Image (cartoon, helix red, strand yellow):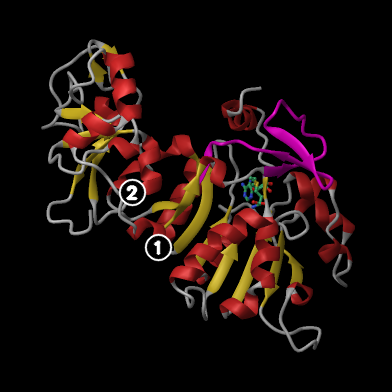
C-alpha cells in the first residue's frame, strides 16, 4: 500500500488506533519547553483520547511531571477503543476499584497530582485511577468539563470523521493545545482560517518528523512503510503534523532566501523544474486565474518579490509569521474568498498555468519591512 494511503485506509476502515511513539512526543514537547522552560509550570494538562497502558502521552508527561512543574495531569481513555476492548490495563486491574463489568462500558480517568506512594517524588506510580460515568467520549459532558478545567489539551485524537468535531471541541475551549492531525486537514474550510490568522500553527515538524505510529497486533502491515521494532508494530505515514497554539522557536526562525534574479540564475533545482514543467526557466510563471506567481518549492521563494506567491502547503512547516503573511489557499478558490485577487475562470479551482491546473497552493506575501532576511 502506498504510504499516503495508510491514513486514508485508517479512515475508511475506521481504524483509530494509531498510537504515538514516546520519542516523537518527547521531540515535539521538548521544543516548547526549550522555548519557554516554564510553559507547563503550575498548569493543568488534559490528555483526552488516551490510555496509559497503550499510549505514551501519559507516560511522557508523568515522567516529566516534576521537571516541568506540572500542577495536575489528567488522562482519559475511551471505553470502545481497541486497547480498552482487547487489553486490561495494569493501572486498572491493580486498582482496588477494578470492576470487570465496568471495564467494557466505562471510560477511564487517570489523575497525577500528588505523591500517593510516599516515594518522595511524583511519577507514573502515583497515577490515580477511576472509572468515568460514561464511555470517555471526548464530546461527553464529563470530559468536556475536564477540558474546561485544564490549561492544555494534548493528544493524538481519532483519525476518522471525528476530526472536525475534535477540532471544534478544542478550538471552542479557548485553551492551549497540541495535537496530531493529517496534513490534508491544512486546507479544510474550518481549519485553514485559524492558520491564516495565526491563531494556530504547525508544530516543529511534519511528515517524516513523526517517525511512525504503533498499531495493534491485528493491524495488517503493508510494504516498506511498516515495520516491527522491539516487538512493536509500527507504520510510518508521512502524512501527519502537529497543530498547536503554544509558541516554539522554529516559527520565529527566518527562511534564508535568494532574490528572484539570483534564484533564476543559480537555483539549479528551480531552473530544472521550470524548464521541465513550463518550458521556460527565465521567469516564475504567473497564474492565469489568480494574480500570483507559482513557486514550486519553499526554498525557491524570492526574497524580493512583493506580490502574492503560490507555495506548496509544506511551506507552513517553515512559516515565520514575522516574515510572511498568509493570504489564502487556492484549495478554497471556489468559495469566493479569493475575490480581489482572483480573475474570472471557469475550468479549475486550482491555480492554472498554461491551461493546466497545478497542485493546491498556499498564497503568501512577504511582510514589508521584515528585517532579517
Ligand atoms: C489515534 S489514537 C491515539 C491514541 C493515543 N492518544 C496516542 O496517541 O497514543 C486515537 C484514540 O482515540 C480513541 N477514540 C476514538 N473515538 C473516540 C471518542 N469519540 N472519544 C474519545 N476517544 C476516542 C481511540 O480509541 C484511540 O485510542
At x 24%, y 57%, the residue is: 322
Residue on which the image places disc 2:
319
Asked whether 152 or 204 is in front, the reply is 204
**Residue 140 in the figure: left or right of residue 350:** right
At x 82%, y 35%, the residue is: 218
Residue on which the image places disc 1:
249
Percent x, y for residue 317? 41, 46
Asked whether 311 or 331 is in front, the reply is 311
Contact flag, marks 1 and 2 (Cβ < 8 Å): no
Percent x, y for residue 270? 31, 28
Percent x, y for residue 286? 17, 23
At x 71%, y 55%, the residue is: 55
248 inside magenta stretch: no
Q: Quadrant of the N terminus?
A: top right
Instruction: Please state the extent of the stretch shown in magenta in the rendering.
Output: 213-241
**Residue 372 in the figure: left or right of residue 25:** left
> Quick one: label 1 or label 2, which is nearer the N terminus?
1
Quarter of the rendering containing residue 300: top left
Quarter of the rendering containing residue 97: bottom right
Any atom of ligand 1 within 8 Å of the CB at mark 1?
no
**Which numbered disc covers residue 280?**
none
**Residue 258 in the figure: left or right of residue 53:** left
At x 38%, y 52%, the residue is: 201
Classify mark 1: helix, strand or loop.
helix
Image position of 52 with respect to 44: above or below: above
Classify mark 2: helix, strand or loop.
loop
Give the CA distance from mark 1 to mark 2. Answer: 12 Å
Image position of 166 with respect to 14: above or below: below
Percent x, y for residue 236? 64, 37
Question: For the residue carrying disc 2, how many other residues have a C-alpha within 10 Å: few (<14), some (14-19), or many (20+)?
Answer: many
Amino acid at each position: 500500500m502506498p504510504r499516503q494511503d495508510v491514513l486514508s485506509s485508517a479512515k475508511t476502515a475506521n481504524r483509530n488506533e494509531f498510537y504515538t511513539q514516546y520519542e516523537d512526543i518527547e521531540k515535539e514537547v521538548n521544543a516548547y519547553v526549550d522555548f519557554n522552560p516554564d510553559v507547563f509550570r503550575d498548569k493543568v494538562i488534559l490528555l483526552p483520547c488516551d490510555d496509559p497502558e497503550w499510549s505514551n502521552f501519559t507516560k511522557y508527561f508523568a515522567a516529566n511531571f516534576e521537571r516541568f512543574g506540572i500542577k495536575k495531569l489528567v488522562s482519559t481513555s475511551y471505553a470502545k477503543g481497541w486497547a480498552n476492548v482487547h487489553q486490561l490495563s495494569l493501572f486498572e486491574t491493580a486498582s482496588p476499584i477494578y470492576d470487570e463489568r465496568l471495564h467494557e462500558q466505562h471510560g477511564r480517568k487517570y489523575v497525577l497530582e500528588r505523591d500517593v506512594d510516599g516515594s518522595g517524588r511524583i511519577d507514573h506510580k502515583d497515577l490515580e485511577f477511576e472509572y468515568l460515568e460514561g464511555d470517555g467520549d471526548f464530546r461527553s459532558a464529563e470530559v468536556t468539563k475536564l477540558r474546561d478545567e485544564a490549561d492544555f489539551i494534548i493528544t493524538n485524537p481519532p483519525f476518522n470523521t471525528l476530526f472536525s468535531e475534535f477540532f471544534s471541541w478544542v478550538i471552542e475551549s479557548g485553551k492551549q493545545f497540541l495535537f496530531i492531525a493529517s496534513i490534508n486537514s491544512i486546507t479544510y474550510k474550518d481549519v485553514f482560517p485559524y492558520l491564516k490568522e495565526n491563531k494556530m500553527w504547525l508544530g516543529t515538524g511534519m511528515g517524516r518528523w513523526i517517525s511512525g505510529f504503533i498499531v495493534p497486533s491485528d493491524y495488517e502491515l503493508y510494504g516498506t512503510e511498516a515495520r516491527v521494532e522491539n516487538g512493536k508494530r509500527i507504520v510510518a505515514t508521512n502524512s501527519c503534523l502537529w497543530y498547536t497554539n503554544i509558541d516554539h522557536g522554529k516559527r520565529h526562525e527566518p527562511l534564508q532566501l535568494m532574490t528572484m534574479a539570483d534564484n533564476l540564475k543559480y537555483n539549479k533545482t528551480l531552473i530544472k523544474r521550470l524548464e521541465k514543467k513550463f518550458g521556460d526557466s527565465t521567469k516564475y510563471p504567473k497564474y492565469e486565474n489568480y494574480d500570483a506567481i507559482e513557486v514550486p518549492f519553499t526554498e525557491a521563494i524570492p526574497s524580493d518579490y512583493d506580490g502574492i506567491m503560490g507555495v506548496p502547503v509544506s511551506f507552513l512547516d517553515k512559516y515565520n509569521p514575522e516574515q510572511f503573511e498568509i493570504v489564502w489557499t487556492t484549495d478554497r478558490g471556489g468559495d469566493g474568498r479569493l475575490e480581489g485577487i482572483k480573475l474570472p475562470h471557469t475550468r479549475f479551482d486550482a491555480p492554472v498555468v498554461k491551461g493546466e491546473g497545478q497542485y493546491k497552493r498556499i498564497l503568501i506575501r512577504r511582510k514589508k519591512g521584515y528585517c532579517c532576511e
